Image (cartoon, helix red, strand yellow):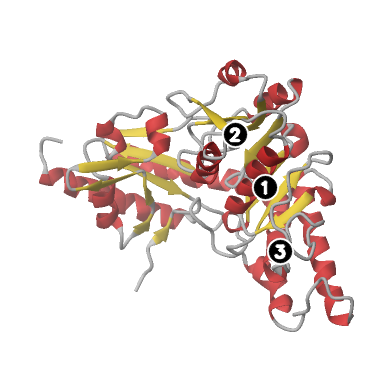
Amino acid sequence: MTLPVYLDYNGTTPLDPEVIAAMRPFLEEEFGNPSSSHWYGIKPKQAVEKARRQVAKLLGCLPEEIFFTSGGTESNNHAIKGIARALRHKGRHIITSAFEHPAVLEVCRYLKGKGFETTLVPVDDMGMLDPERVKQALRPDTILITVMHANNEVGTVQPVKAVAGLAREHGIVMHSDAAQSPGKIPVDVQVLGVDMLSIAGHKIYAPKGTGALYVRKGIAPEKFCHGAGQEKEWRAGTENVPGIVGLGKACEIAARDMGTAMTRMKEMRDRLHRGIAEKVPGIRLNGHPENRLPNTLSLSFMGLEANRLLEEIGLEVAASAGAACHAETVAVSHVLEAMRVPLEWSKGTLRFSVGRMTTGQEIDRAINAVVNAVTLLRSENPSL
């Protein structure tokens, strides 16, 4: 059986062969606890610190500013809850966008029940945040601004540097969820000017269950996980050594191959877009046409339902939906709603995301599958 073409790299990535090779010794002979003072803990401890340096090099920070976590969601939780608790004596107001991942929005929603208030700044029709709108939302009691670096659904890259500048001017902590960015676009915390930044291993060809949080020196979120004192007593628990090693290697590869990967992914993404657009009328691109991740393509198909389209291409292409239609209801993603995409478009939205491994042959196969599926579904309803 020929497997479907995988075009859901924003959902998760396969492990890079170099990552697997780097992890293997720590899945086999090097099983020791890095906190152990004896022989078996030496190489695992060295490996964890090497990985810390690899992540720091990708992000342009000091190794001691990197803390390992179980992934992007945990990193976001650590950052937002940790700062909220540490600075609640100064204020209880948080600013974010209506465009964020649930790993940010749900944390803010949780904090609302703890006496905090969140302002959701709107984005424009291309998913772009206006720093001026952020400035207008500032209050004397604002303690944190959290804005994602790049959107997971439509790929729009946000003006994080400009927002971070505002935060710095007003003495406010700035956090960015950068789960989708590393390996696709440059992510340098010094250039961006952020105080905290989250990354997720399984978005950059490392294992699931690994991630990291950058915390600028001098920023002190409240301790999140209590225990034996690992990760400078901030995130206790025995380290996931194989996962951390894999994350470090993935970050090394991302830094090494950034230029070629960006160019290739953009070529594959644009080839897919052109191939579909040339043969299918009534489609719409979602997200910013230029300031967008080089691998991400969100397309809406007028009058169609995303889940029905996914069913039709399911044996040929693996992609994700921007809306779920059930009986008389349509659940549109909050990202499309924030961009005010009309329902007749949004309900037929698919996200295609290519990766480093995507080939031109796979793209051509995906084009044929999508074109055939749209043609078939529209023939069933001639009014479309």
What amino acid does circle 1 point to? Met
Question: Real-space Cα distance between discs 3 and 1?
Answer: 21 Å
Vertical side of 36 occupied by 120: above or below = above
Residue 80 versus residue 32 in the image, above or below: above
Which is closer to the viewer, label 2 or label 1?
Answer: 2
Is 184 positioned to the left or the right of 1 in the image?
A: right
**In this view of the protein, which residue sits in the foreground, 270 or 205?**
205
Q: At 62% from the left edge and 20% from the top edge, which residue is drawn?
A: 138
Instruction: Give the SS element for disc 2.
Output: loop
Q: Earlier in the sequence, mark 3 or mark 2?
A: 2
From the viewer's perspective, is the residue at label 3 or at label 1 nearer?
Answer: 3
How far is disc 3 from disc 2 in space, using C-alphas? 26 Å
Residue drawn where x is 27% and y is 32% of the image? 343
Amino acid marked by disc 2: Val
Estimate the spatial distance between the alpha carbons at disc 2 and disc 1, rounded to whole Å: 23 Å
Q: Which mark is residue 147?
A: 2
Residue 282 appears anywhere in the view? no
Q: Position of residue 283 (x, y in %)?
A: 30, 35
Q: Secondary structure at mark 3?
A: helix
Q: Tell me, yes or no, whether the two marked residues, 2 and 1, touch with CB atoms within 8 Å.
A: no
- Pointer 1: what residue? 258
Q: Which residue is mark 3?
A: 244
Give left or right: position of 113 versus 303. right
Is residue 197 left or right of 291 when viewed as pictured?
Answer: right
Among the two numbered marks 2 and 1 on one chain, the one whose residue lies closer to the N terminus: 2
> Which of these two is toward me, 201 or 110?
110
Residue 265 in the image: state x and y as whole percent: 54, 47
